[in-house]
């Protein structure tokens, strides 16, 4: 006897099968919704960290490292470092520009690095880094990166002969207009104590790294008794 499907049953799904399908669909949708919400929440958290104090301090470290490597290019009538401030509408509040050596295919090239602090909207500011190669196929082609956007204040002071200068080069006669020995950076964020960093400009102070020994020093070190 053939025990196949009953000839009286109509094709399609039963009511119970439809309920099961709807329940499974709702479960899958709930799981997908939870995953998508988690991904969006993680993205918002990462974006908040990039806009928050962590990003501001990272921008300060970047500026400090590059400023420590400031270099005086052998070009006449070109100030090796310039600092200006402005209160004019539409202009950056602070502009710091200097030159740094960068590794190139044939040794080292020189780039002009400019940091700008410019007001935007809602009392916020934008921290920009602009790099311009001084030679090669991309010479004079600026590349701009926004390092931080938010409510902050950055004060840059050039230190020379125990005097803090808010602009550089200083007025004639005050001090030498060359590369200064150091700079002081002060970052202020809402609700936090100001973070102050003093940057020693190595090329201006004559620091050699790694330490180099002269012939006399090397001979003395070679002939020194063990343990000295």
Image (cartoon, rainbow, N blue to C red):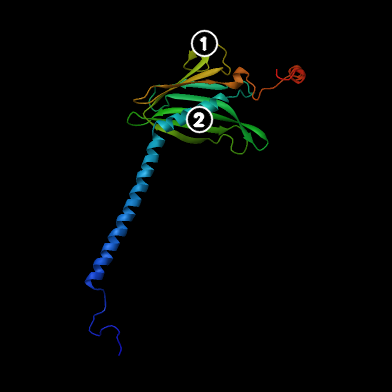
**Could you tell me which secondary element the residue under label 1 belongs to?**
loop
Name the residue nearer the viewer: 189 or 211.
211
Residue drawn at point x = 32 percent, y = 59 percent: 28
Using the rendered view, name the quadrant where residue 12 is placed.
Answer: bottom left
Kindly indicate whether the residue at mark 1 contacts the one at mark 2 (C-beta within 8 angstroms).
Answer: no
Q: How many numbered marks have been drawn onto this rendered protein structure?
A: 2
* Farthest front residue in view: 227
Image coordinates for residue 197, horizontal then vertical, percent: 48, 21
In the image, is residue 66 above or below residue 31?
Answer: above
**Could you tell me which secondary element the residue under label 2 belongs to?**
helix
* Farthest bottom residue in view: 1
Q: Quadrant of the C terminus?
A: top right
Name the residue nearer the viewer: 32 or 127.
32
In the image, is residue 27 above or below residue 214?
Answer: below
The crowding category of the residue bearing disc 2, from other C-alpha atoms within 10 Å (few below 14, some 14 to 19, many at least 20), is few
Q: Mark 2 points at which residue?
A: 62
In the image, is residue 15 above or below residue 224?
Answer: below
Q: Which of marks 2 and 1 is nearer the N terminus?
A: 2
Distance (Cα) linking label 2 and label 1: 25 Å
Residue drawn at point x = 63 percent, y = 34 percent: 103
Q: Is residue 203 left or right of residue 228?
A: left
Badge number at residue 162: 1
Q: In which quarter of the image is the N terminus?
A: bottom left
């Amino acid at each position: 006897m053939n025990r196949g499907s009953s000839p009286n049953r109509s094709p399609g799904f039963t009511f119970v099968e439809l309920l099961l399908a709807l329940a499974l669909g709702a479960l899958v949708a709930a799981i997908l919704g939870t995953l998508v919400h988690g991904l969006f929440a993680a993205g918002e958290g990462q974006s908040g960290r990039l806009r928050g104090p962590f990003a501001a301090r990272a921008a300060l470290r970047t500026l400090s490292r590059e400023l420590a490597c400031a270099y005086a290019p052998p070009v006449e009538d070109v100030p090796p470092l310039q600092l200006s401030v402005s209160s004019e509408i539409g202009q950056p509040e602070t502009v710091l520009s200097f030159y740094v050596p960068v590794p190139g295919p044939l040794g080292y090239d020189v780039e002009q690095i400019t940091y700008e602090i410019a007001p935007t909207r809602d009392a916020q500011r934008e921290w920009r880094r602009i790099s311009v190669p001084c030679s090669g196929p991309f010479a004079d082609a600026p590349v701009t990166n926004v390092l931080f956007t938010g409510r902050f204040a950055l004060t840059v002071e050039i230190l020379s002969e125990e005097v803090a200068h808010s602009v550089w080069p200083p007025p004639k006669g005050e001090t030498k207009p060359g590369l200064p020995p150091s700079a002081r950076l002060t970052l202020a964020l809402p609700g936090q104590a100001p973070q102050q960093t003093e940057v020693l400009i190595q090329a201006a102070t004559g620091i050699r790294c790694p330490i180099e020994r002269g012939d006399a020093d090397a001979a003395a070190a070679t002939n020194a008794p063990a343990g000295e």
